[in-house]
Amino acid sequence: MSNEAATAAATTTAQAPAPEPAPHGIGASVPAADARAKTEGTFPYAADLWAEGLLWGAVLRSPHPHARIVSIDTSHARSMPGVRAVITHEDVPGTPLYGRGTADRPVFASEVVRHHGEPIAAVAADHPDTARMAAAAVIVEYEVLDPVTDPEQAFEAEPLHPDGNLIRHIPLRHGDPNAVGEVVVEGLYRIGRQDPAPIGAEAGLAVPRPDGGVELYTASTDPHTDRDVLAACYGLPPERVKIVVTGVPGATADREDRGFQLPLGLLALKTGCPVKLTATREESFLGHVHRHPTLLRYRHHADAEGRLVKVEAQILLDAGAYADTSSDALAAAVAFACGPYVVPNAFIEGWAVRTNNPPSGHVRGEGAMQVCAAYEAQMDKLARRLGLDPAELRLRNVMATGDVLPTGQTVTCPAPVAELLQAVREHPLPPLPKDVPEEEWLLPGGPEGAGEPGAVRRGVGYGLGMVHMLGAEGADEVSTATVRVENGVGTVLCAAVETGQGFATLARQIVQETLGIDEVHVAPVDTDQPPAGAGCRGRHTWVSGGAVERAAKMVRTQLLQPLAQKFGMSTELLQIADGKITSYDGVLSTPVAEAFQGKELWATAQCRPHPTEPLDGSGQGDAFVGLAFCAIRAVVDVDIELGSVRVVELAVAQDVGHVLNPAQLAARIEAGVTQGVGIALTENLRTPRGQVRHPDLTGYALPTALDAPDIQIVKLVEERDVVAPFGAKAVSAVPVVASPAAIASAVRAATGRPVNRLPIRPQAAVVTGQ
């Protein structure tokens, strides 16, 4: 190399910019640890599990929604070559019933089948095809019964369950029953059955243990509760059942169907061999819970200025065959039936009933989503009746911090609803089709839409949503975490399952921020760790994140205490920042890595929010720990001849408390909004006479990338909730709640039609006589 070339190379090297430091700590957009593996297809999901001597499982499910079981003959299945076990209700050694909240669901149906797809028997064989054929060879003689599929008929029908058809009734009474407004509007609304449609169907591996117990490797989102339920049904003490959380692909609901886990472990115990069970997509649709289909009747009273005087409502949730979390969903629906508005008088009746439809349970925003669609439709009706702008009417009624919910609970957390609504209202509207090139404009039918541009009408609508965070009505919300640092490398042990909500990333950020270290790992989750609870309603951001923060601060004190004593000062006078420990007066300055060198420090801590209480006989009580709010403005194009709808833009403003990871927060909001698009326009699991029709991803229409609108996050209000760790609020559920209501509102604005059903059917958006 010539001297000139060497000089040029040296100059280039010297002038090359230093590499950007990796995102670090609270407030940084730290990427998820498993993001690369999932995008490259190398992430090990539960369906990828394997073990030596593996057997394959299969489950026989009922083809009827309601039937009496006359007999079950397993002899043909047992005699097939390669079959190692066939089990029915007679092979359940422990309690035969299980369930969330209420143990009312049998492991295997024994006398009566109560819904299409209910498990009857399970088989283990040496090949998956053999297992499926053996399950089909189990002969079940049924006496088919008429199913009860209309929740209104459940009140008068013969009991479908020993516990009766009524699961819960909540009569909420707030204010003066004789109050009357100058303007009254009424409406009847129906919400369909949404399936969570997880990316990967349920799968798992059960391995028998030498002590007579069993280990299950599954994508559980609440491993300790699952373990306790399974142990009771297996007739084993909890310490002999272990659940190892493996390969969770993401969850917007209860990720694992315990009716899937239970046969899996029983087959392993029966055969003494590892057993793998992988559900087909059809089995996944039949087995796990769905969003509650809901019937809502509303009457809103307002004065001549549009201020709400009284809200009356009747809310009926179809729980399907078993109770599951229907009591919790009903409490949310009744409590939030008036929305984020000041309502001095409210009288709400809520019921959850059993039918012979597929079971309903926890799906993101349960209860709150259904009532939001109804109360926002009522606000649109009021605005139209009074001749007011829909946004202006809402602004005259929105609640704020210090207002009182219809349950009598005071809103003590930040509630910047007016600010959120103003933000989306003032955001510039997207250009009209006539203002953009023709090739950039999509008709409501899609890129190859069959409609005519002249039949397209644009509408703008609003949705204001609210959800509660954590459990409610006295639920004991607690999580435990351990933080260990060895030679400057941190490890977090916490049984909070990473379901896509970002807890594993947040835990790393908390330890990085608190201790000033770069390398932090989150240990795999199993039930040998202390419990952390279910991964829903923002629990792990709040409760598990709070536990990690407390444990990290305890380790910080252990690290700083010797240094503080050496220099005769308290640990409060030392700070950790930029990789250094420094004192307030500058006397001490030492690298964090050097301080941790040769040390192993650890601490365990718990986080338990303040207690709540159940709603009383009048629907009153401080039932919720915290609330989150969201405002969405939807812009839609509707072909009024075909009834097709295209969501052009959704503008979102949300109160988030404190942004912990900007990129992750934006992704969660966008995902929630897109899920709401499916609820509004396409997703409806049809169950005529209780029979699940087209239980696959061809018959069940999920929104695709072409259906996803332009999502504009126009404002994030960071007003910290003082009782929450870091002041942060849950962000995933409330966009799901508000976006369907906003889209329906926009379709009403475009068509003038009432739009009282979700998903919106084409005939509801057709305008005749144009």
Image (tube, rainbow, N blue to C red):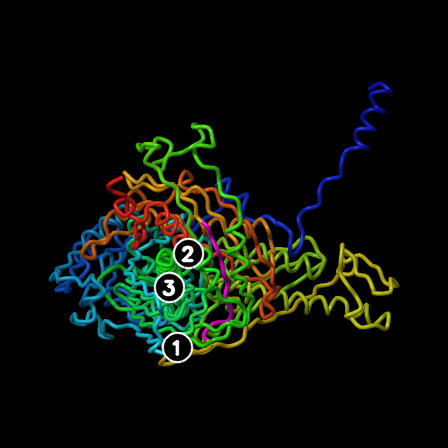
Is residue 106 toward the left or the right of residue 728 in the image? left
In the image, 260 versus 470, the foreground residue is 470
Q: What residue lies at 64% left-to-right and 51% top-to-bottom?
A: 28
Asked whether the viewer can see residue 48, the reply is yes
Residue 626: % across, % down? 51, 69
Instruction: Report helix, strand or loop for mark 3.
Output: loop
Is residue 324 toward the left or the right of residue 220 in the image? left
Instruction: Report helix, strand or loop for mark 2.
Output: loop
Instruction: Report helix, strand or loop for mark 1.
Output: strand
Label 2 – label 1 distance at C-alpha: 27 Å
The answer to whether mark 2 and mark 1 are in CB contact below 8 A is: no
Residue 180 counted in the magenta span: no
Residue at the disc numbered 3: 367
Q: Earlier in the sequence, mark 2 or mark 1?
A: 1
Which mark's residue is nearer the viewer, 2 or 1? Answer: 2
- Type of amino acid under label 2: Leu
Q: What residue lies at 32% left-to-right and 39% top-to-bottom?
A: 639
Quarter of the image where the C terminus is located: top left
In the image, 192 versus 755, the foreground residue is 755
319 up-or-down from 26: above or below? below
In the image, 524 versus 577, the foreground residue is 577
Which mark's residue is nearer the viewer, 2 or 3? Answer: 2
Disc number placed over residue 388 in the picture, else none = 2
Which quadrant of the view contains residue 765?
Answer: top left
The answer to whether mark 3 and mark 1 are in CB contact below 8 A is: no
Residue 246: % across, % down? 46, 54
Residue at the disc numbered 1: 174
Residue 471: % across, % down? 46, 69
